[in-house]
Amino acid sequence: MAVVPDFVLDKAFEAVYVGVQDLIVKNFIFKSLFNDVRSRLDDLAPLIKEMAQYNQKMGRPEKELEALKGVMEKGQELVNKCSTITRWSPFKKYKYARKLLQWQESLKTPLEKLKVQESMQIMKIDGTVDDIHRMMLKQQPAESSSSTRLELPPLPRLIVGLDGPLNDLKKKLLADDGVSRLVLTAPGGCGKTTLATMFCQDEEVKGKVKDNIIFITVSQKGNLELVVKRLCESESSPVPTFQNKVHMLQWMQTFFKGRQNPLLLVLDDIWSGSSESILHSFQFESSNYKILVTSRSEFPDFGSSYPLKLLDDDKAMKLFYHSASLGDKCSPEREELSRKIVKRCNGFPLAITVVGRSLSGQPIEVWRKRVSEWSKDSCILDAETELFLCLQSSLDALDKRLAIVKDCYLDLGSFPEDKEIRVDDLIDMWAELYDIDDDSVIFANVYELANRNLANLVDKRRSDMKMEGDDFYGQRFVTQHDLLRELAIYNAKLDPVEQRKRMNIEIRGKKIPKWWREQECHPIKARLLSITTTTDFDMEWPNLQLPEAEVFVLHFQSPSRYSLPAFVQKMDKLKVLVIDGGRELINFELLGLLPNLKRISLIRLRIGFLTHKPIQLKSLKKISFKSCDAEGIGKGVFRMSDAFRNLEELNYSEEFRNVGYRRHLNSEEFLVECCNLIHLKKISISFGRRVTLLLDFIAGLRDFLPEEIGNLVNLEVLRLRSCIFLSKLPSSISNLKKLNFLDISECVNIELPKNIGELSSLRKVDMRNCYSVKELPPSVSDLHQLEEVICNREDKGSLWEPFLPTLTNLRVVVIPRTQRSLLETFSDGWSS
């Protein structure tokens, strides 16, 4: 420090310098970072000396250095605060990361005024603060929730660098003398899940284990109960009730040891210290099953480890060229910049993909700027730290024109880790949060996020059911990589608790965030509230004041009876409520106090409670039931028509295997209740292709819509998609004089009513894969408003062409019929 002259700036600079040295010695979290900070300050010291000499020569008063002195004193304060931060203080890391960024900006103004080696000083100071920011990001822990499923995750369009590892996995796991348990390990974003998915889809693997493959995404807070549940679902068997963990372990041994055919079990995303205990349950020996585990950690006590390596330069360049849409050739300068960018990404596939997509289609000046912004002497030492920086730069690329898209991305952090977020739930949220009344505009935002690799759009519709412009968004989901979700959560936490726009809360057992305990009496301005409970949640809801909240997303992780938090009755501005999980709610009537509640989405609940206690939601316009059990809905003391007297849209969808759902959904009480909602304008009932109904079909059972559907005189849209049990529409459908769209696609057993011609407002009919429709009723000729019919190619000639001379406005859109027998149509259900 001898090079620093004796003037007012000296002491402030020295205090920052000494504080950094102290952190290097005492605080291991900042040790490597502040070694670099110290060298930067060493570089800054002679510049300060030059400034002082310049001022003395020019006769400038030293008071102009007071501004820089104040900035340095602020830096000293921040350094002192950093010394108190530990790895267990995630909120403080978020808080001081934001303050350090603001300090960076405050350094620029006084340096510009001094005009002494201005550009060099700002560059060095910016680099210093950026490095501090990196370390703050590096230390943040993952905050996420668990989700398990049996379906394989989607594969990216281009996969590079995994053919060799795939062959290695097959040699290790498939060989007669191979291992029975293998841990695929690597840092986040390296492709572990992708490789595990490829392994499950490999023909050699399937030839060895047939279709006996179970893929379970465990995540950080997964537990053995959830694994057992998914194992039972794989066999379409009920989940047993266990008295204790010993009985559960005995059941698991019987499940695996009693199998005659070989089995492959994939446990994806096991976390050290949290979900690691699941592995202890698989210590029994059996020669007839293999377990593949993916994790960021090694578990030598469980099985052999296979470390997944990063991409080499050639493969990394191939992936970057694909992500950046460069094709086979590009200019020499762009190629050189590409190599610098790929080198910065250090072989991490996710980082390469995200950066490439953010630069795709951008002019060369943007590429130059991106490379120059990165510090020349920094390198990627920790995968997740640098991935955060890359992802943040992609998020920052969303300019004012895409401000809503950026908000939509940040909203995705309100859903649990590995969650398949339903697009129709996002539509409900974003329609109210951002005042968008066109679903297609909202869906365009989803596409924008997917195109920028900030989210993944998963379309589970069968290929022949996909059609451009289809406004049915069921069976379409959004997923996020863990790091992308953590980036959204990080941005949400930059503001003080009371000022946040999004409040994401996770409750573990009886533990709530510290700020909640300390600030429960202070109002919070968040417009979006998300609460996720873990499976061991067991507590009374603490108080919260959220007077501005418009959307409340509530995730229960175990199938128990829950109560809504009491504070919900004071959320007067609440417009959208999404409840996922649990068994039933015991105080749903609290919602009757909310004057602005418009949309409710209930997922995986027993909804009989809706009629157990009187309630009136006069403002409610839309309610959605997804994979819900409707048994008992008509046995209560209250009618749905009284509770939702102004309801305009009702949706029911079944997305998972559920052998028993048929009798619940199609109970006479439930359907009659729906038909008494006389203000309904839209009804959508749809089922996923994996629903098990084959046994009912073979038994010759037939189901009908009740005659009461004729009461819905205001109905404009009737969607009965994939209702393969439905054999006819009631004659009372002729009362629906306002009906303009009828969707009976995939209703393979349906016949059209003779009086369909009385639907005088009908403009569109979707009847793809309606195998049982052999002829059209003559009254079809009276559908003079009919403009579009979607059908199979074979049906155009045999069914509709005779009516074309009469229906002059009609356009027939044809798609190929799925070439398979009726029995094969139900093959998914039969296999389950």
Image (cartoon, grey):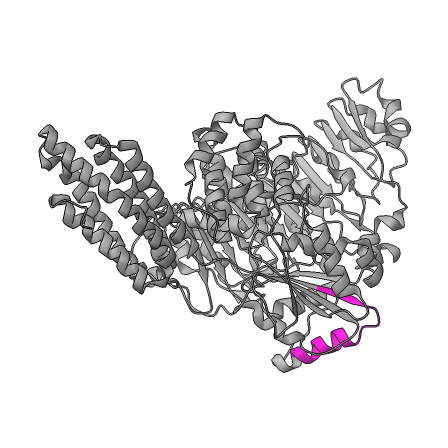
Q: Residue at x 45, y 50 (%)?
A: 489
Image location of residue 818, percent across then percent down: 85, 40
Is 91 magenta? The answer is: no
Choose between 726 and 249: the one closer to the eye.
249
Image location of residue 225, percent across then percent down: 61, 70
Q: Is residue 650 left or right of residue 827?
A: left
Q: Is residue 627 something one can see in this rendering? A: no
Tally the marks.
0
Q: Is residue 305 something one can see in this rendering? A: yes
- Range drawn in magenta: 248-265
Image location of residue 28, percent across then percent down: 36, 63
Q: Residue at x 61, y 72 (%)?
A: 300
Q: Is residue 197 left or right of residue 221?
A: right
Image location of residue 791, percent across then percent down: 81, 32
Is 262 magenta? The answer is: yes
264 in relation to 380, above or below = below
686 in relation to 661, above or below = above
Which quarter of the picture shows residue 33?
bottom left
Which quarter of the picture shows residue 647?
top right
Choose between 710 and 814: the one closer to the eye.
814
Q: Residue at x 59, y 70 (%)?
A: 299
542 in relation to 440, above or below = below
Quadrant occupied by the C terminus = bottom right
Choose between 327 and 732: the one closer to the eye.
327
